[in-house]
Image (cartoon, rainbow, N blue to C red):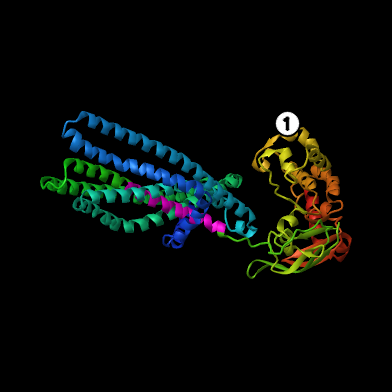
């Protein structure tokens, strides 16, 4: 019982901690979103419509005129039919009026159908351009950007937030113009027919706008909160899916579900609040419309008795009022739609405005084919101000040499290769390849000549052949198979049901860790880089597989400058130069034999490895 009680206490504490975390996020979001409607966002979105203006504007004007005129003429025909055809019992005139109204409805329907189809097509092109720009920009951002944001948060901005702009950028903008023109047209006709009755009805409009002004501010903020909470849920879901093995291994399903449930409830409350506020526009319109109708029939009846208007005019007024409140209602919905779109566009443009920390200089030029001489001179680096990852690294590497980096976790091994690939830029000092500072060349020309094999090899969805060809997309099937044979991957590939055409899913879970790493070796060999980086690339390979790839490594490393991060003696003992790092500093350097004779840190690491192997044996 005590064990169950302790577990329950832990679960309760976990739920309380989760609730405090969610509440803290909510508070921070409210602080961030407390700002006015930003018309700059509207202006930026309109730039995506500008390339299609020549196509959109003429159609919009024509359809606006056709649709608006036909809609405004119908009540006039109704008034004429009542005051003349019915009053004089003229069946022929009545038939013409009915046929005229039918013709106007058909023209109006055709114009609207064509407009909707055309604007949807243009709107989808705009969405395509926006999503293309967003994804293209994100691909150019530096590692610091991805270090600070979960993948789900990035994903939701490319998908959900862009999709939320779809209605606004398809029919929304055109409908806004049509409704505004229609409103002006109705007001003009009402005042022409009878100034007194028209003014009496229109006076209700300012009342409606005064009542709804404060409501709009609340609606704006509520939809911004919803967009933030939706983003957070997507980020959490992505994290949970990626880490499902860890969650199940530590039996944390219930605490994890409790945390998600709090986020889900919080999102539901925010959405319900925003939806309720949004729907409050309709009652305001309906009440205002009802007041308008009451004024119409009360004051209209008085004017009929006074002989100032006819019954047909009164009916026409009633029809125009119906048409009048309809666009106002749509404008209210349009405003809410714009608020949702603005909340989404703020998030989208936050990413587009993000500048890469590692940027090319204006005068950057392509790095010519390199030999592989590399020079680290006084290199220092900080992930955050005051947090040194590297301190005063000096290293000269000759073309074709292999450099092994060893040291405890956090000693700076991975930081060195991150700087060499320009995933980050040095805080001070310089890194040169063939006497050229890597900050003076284009990033693409640098990374195209540097290959990297990671411990956690990423396998993309597709065939094994496609995954190997990722190293060089224009490689032939023969070149792909030759690379696989060179790294001893051909044997296991051909044993699969479809061989090189075997489909693998994201992260290649159908393959063993050793098989995935062999594929990464083949991918790197096919790319044929002049500088090769092995970042713990053999850490998860069993002894039998390791024996197979030792010969493959000789082929892979031959004639290339290489940096090897590894703890296995078999991987590093033949390196030309070994650097022993500790807290960002080079503590020892030399070849294997010299460092063993020195009996320093490196000697201790090797002896510890021998003891572990003996204990395991």
Q: Position of residue 113 (x, y in %)?
A: 42, 37
Judged from the image, the secondary structure of the residue bearing numbered disc 1 is loop
Main SS category, magenta section: helix
Q: Position of residue 12 (x, y in %)?
A: 47, 52
Q: Position of residue 613 (x, y in %)?
A: 80, 51
Q: Which residue is mark 1?
A: 498
Residue extending farthest left: 305
> In which quarter of the view is residue 450 placed?
bottom right
Q: Is residue 573 above or below residue 489?
A: below
Left or right: residue 229 versus residue 152 is: left
Q: Residue at x 84, y 54 (%)?
A: 560
Left or right: residue 251 versus residue 269 is: right
Q: Position of residue 23 (x, y in %)?
A: 45, 57
Q: Is residue 191 visible?
A: yes
Q: Is residue 269 visible?
A: no
Q: Which residues are magenta?
A: 327-352
Q: Is disc 1 surrounded by few (<14), some (14 to 19) or many (20+) residues within 10 Å?
A: few
280 within the magenta span? no
Looking at the image, which is closer to me, 23 or 188? Answer: 188
Q: Residue at x 21, y 41 (%)?
A: 315
Left or right: residue 601 versus residue 103 is: right
330 within the magenta span? yes
Looking at the image, which is closer to me, 330 or 215? Answer: 330
């Amino acid at each position: 019982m005590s064990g169950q009680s302790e577990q329950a206490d832990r679960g309760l504490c976990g739920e309380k901690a989760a609730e405090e975390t969610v509440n803290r996020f909510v508070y921070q979001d409210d602080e961030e979103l407390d700002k006015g409607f930003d018309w700059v966002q509207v202006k930026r979105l309109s730039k995506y419509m500008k390339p299609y203006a020549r196509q959109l504007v003429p159609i919009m004007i024509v359809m606006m005129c056709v649709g608006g005129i036909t809609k405004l003429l119908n009540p006039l025909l109704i008034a004429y039919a009542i005051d003349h055809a019915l009053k004089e019992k003229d069946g022929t005139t009545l038939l013409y009026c009915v046929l005229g109204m039918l013709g106007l409805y058909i023209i109006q329907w055709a114009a609207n159908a064509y407009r909707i189809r055309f604007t949807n097509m243009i709107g989808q092109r705009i969405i395509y351009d926006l999503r293309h720009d967003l994804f293209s920009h994100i691909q150019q951002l530096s590692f610091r950007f991805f270090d600070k944001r979960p993948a789900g948060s990035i994903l939701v901005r490319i998908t959900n937030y862009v999709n939320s702009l779809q209605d606004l950028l398809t029919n929304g903008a055109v409908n806004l113009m049509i409704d505004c023109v229609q409103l002006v047209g109705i007001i003009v006709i009402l005042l022409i027919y009878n100034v007194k009755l028209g003014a009496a009805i229109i006076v209700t409009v300012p009342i409606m706008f005064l009542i709804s002004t404060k409501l709009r501010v609340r609606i704006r903020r509520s939809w911004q909160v919803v967009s933030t909470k939706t983003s957070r849920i997507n980020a959490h879901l992505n994290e949970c899916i990626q880490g499902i093995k860890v969650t199940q291994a530590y039996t944390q399903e219930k605490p994890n579900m409790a945390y998600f449930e709090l986020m889900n409830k919080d999102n539901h409350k925010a959405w319900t609040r925003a939806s309720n506020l949004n729907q409050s526009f309709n009652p305001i319109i309906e009440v205002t419309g009802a007041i308008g109708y009451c004024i119409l029939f009360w004051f209209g009846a008085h004017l009929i008795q006074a002989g100032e208007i006819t019954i047909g005019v009164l009916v026409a007024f009633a029809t125009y009022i119906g048409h009048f409140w309809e666009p106002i209602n749509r404008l209210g919905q349009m405003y809410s739609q714009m608020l949702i779109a603005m909340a989404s566009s703020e998030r989208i443009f936050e990413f587009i405005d993000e500048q890469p920390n590692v940027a090319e200089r204006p005068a950057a030029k392509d790095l010519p084919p390199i030999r592989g001489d590399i020079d680290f001179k006084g290199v220092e680096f900080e992930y955050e101000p005051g947090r040194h990852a590297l301190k005063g690294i000096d290293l000269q590497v000759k073309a074709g040499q292999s450099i092994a980096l060893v040291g405890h976790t956090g000693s700076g091994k991975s930081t060195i290769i991150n700087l060499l690939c320009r995933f980050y830029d040095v805080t001070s000092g310089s890194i040169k390849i063939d006497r050229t500072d890597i900050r003076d060349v284009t990033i693409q020309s640098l990374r195209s000549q540097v290959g990297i094999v990671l411990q956690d090899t990423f396998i993309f969805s597709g065939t094994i052949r496609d995954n190997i060809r990722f190293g060089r997309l224009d490689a032939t099937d023969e070149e792909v198979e030759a690379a696989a044979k060179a790294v001893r991957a051909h044997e296991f590939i051909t044993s699969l049901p479809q061989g090189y055409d075997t489909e693998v899913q994201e992260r290649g879970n159908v393959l063993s860790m050793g098989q995935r790493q062999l594929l990464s070796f083949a991918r790197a060999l096919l790319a044929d880089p002049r500088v090769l980086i092995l970042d713990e690339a053999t850490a998860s390979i069993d002894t039998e597989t390791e024996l197979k790839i030792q010969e493959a490594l000789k082929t892979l490393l031959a004639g290339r400058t290489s940096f090897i991060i590894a703890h296995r003696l078999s991987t590093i003992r033949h390196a030309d130069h070994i650097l022993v790092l500790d807290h960002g500093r080079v503590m020892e350097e030399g070849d294997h034999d010299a460092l063993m004779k020195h009996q320093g840190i490196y000697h201790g690491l090797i002896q510890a490895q021998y003891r572990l192997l003996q204990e395991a044996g």
